[in-house]
Structure formats: C-alpha cells, structure tokens
Image: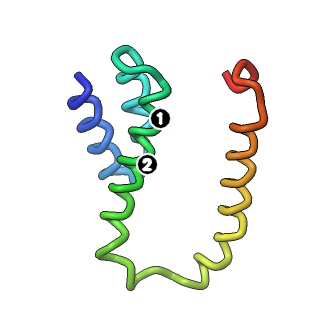
Amino acid sequence: MVELAIVLAYVVFGIAGFGTALVAGPLLAGVLPLSQIIPLLVLLDFSASFGNWLPARRQIAVTELKRLLPCMLLGCALGAYGLLALRAELLM
C-alpha cells in the first residue's frame, strides 16, 4: 500500500511538478503516523526536484530567480516560525 501510494504520487509529480503530498498524504495516513509521513514526503520531494533540476540547471532564468528568492526565503522562515511557535491544536 505504501509503495503504491508513493508511486501514484510521483506519477502526479511527474505530470504536474507538484502534488505529491496531496496524493500520498491521505493514502499514507491510514498506514503511517503523520510524524513519519511528512519527513518522508519532504525527502522524496527534494530528491525528485533535485533530479529534475540537475539536467536543466543551465536553462534557469537567473534574473527571475533572484527576484523570487527573497519572498521564498521569507515564506520559508515564516512557515518554520509558525510550526515552532504555534500550538499543535491551533495548527490542526
């Protein structure tokens, strides 16, 4: 069941470029605890994204990336702060 959910999620990732957590999360929630699902999907998403980026890295629009990077870093920092600072009940 776990393997099938992950394969299905990465078929969606291959088509759309996102959505693994949307597909695999609910399917895996019946088998694994959420505390294991999230790190698993983060590591798999990072690996898949890095694998897609590596061959195409010379085609990156660096000026666009420089424009987006500050907002991406701010969003990551705010999200990490929210996860650490807010109560679990509020996040649910």
Q: Is residue 32 above or below residue 24?
A: above
Instruction: Please tell me the numbered disc located at residue 70.
Output: none
- Residue at the spot of label 2: 18
Q: Helix or strand or loop: what does disc 2 sit on?
A: loop
Quarter of the C terminus within the rendering: top right
- Residue at 39% x, 38% y is 40
Looking at the rendered image, the disc whose residue lies closer to the viewer, 2 or 1, is: 1
Callout 2, which amino acid?
A: Phe
- The quarter of the picture where residue 4 lies is top left
Q: Quadrant of residue 59?
A: bottom left
Q: Residue at x 51, y 82 (%)?
A: 61
Mark 1: secondary structure: helix
Residue shown at 36%/23% (left/top)? 28
Q: Position of residue 15 (x, y in %)?
A: 32, 51
Residue drawn at (69%, 37%) of the image: 83
- The foreground one among 52 and 87 is 87
Colouring used for the render = rainbow
User: Which residue in the rendered view is the most extreme toward the top?
Assistant: 30
- The quarter holding residue 39 reads top left
Question: Which is nearer the N-term, disc 2 or disc 1?
Answer: 2
Between 43 and 52, the residue placed more toward the observer is 43
- Return the residue at label 1: 38
Q: Is residue 8 above or below residue 11?
A: above
> Label 2: how many residues lie within 10 Å, few (<14), some (14-19) or many (20+)?
some
> Is residue 71 left or right of 13 when viewed as pictured?
right
Q: Amino acid at mark 1?
A: Ile
Q: Is residue 83 above or below residue 58?
A: above
**Location of the N terminus (image quadrant):** top left
User: Residue 16 location in percent, x, y?
Assistant: 38, 51
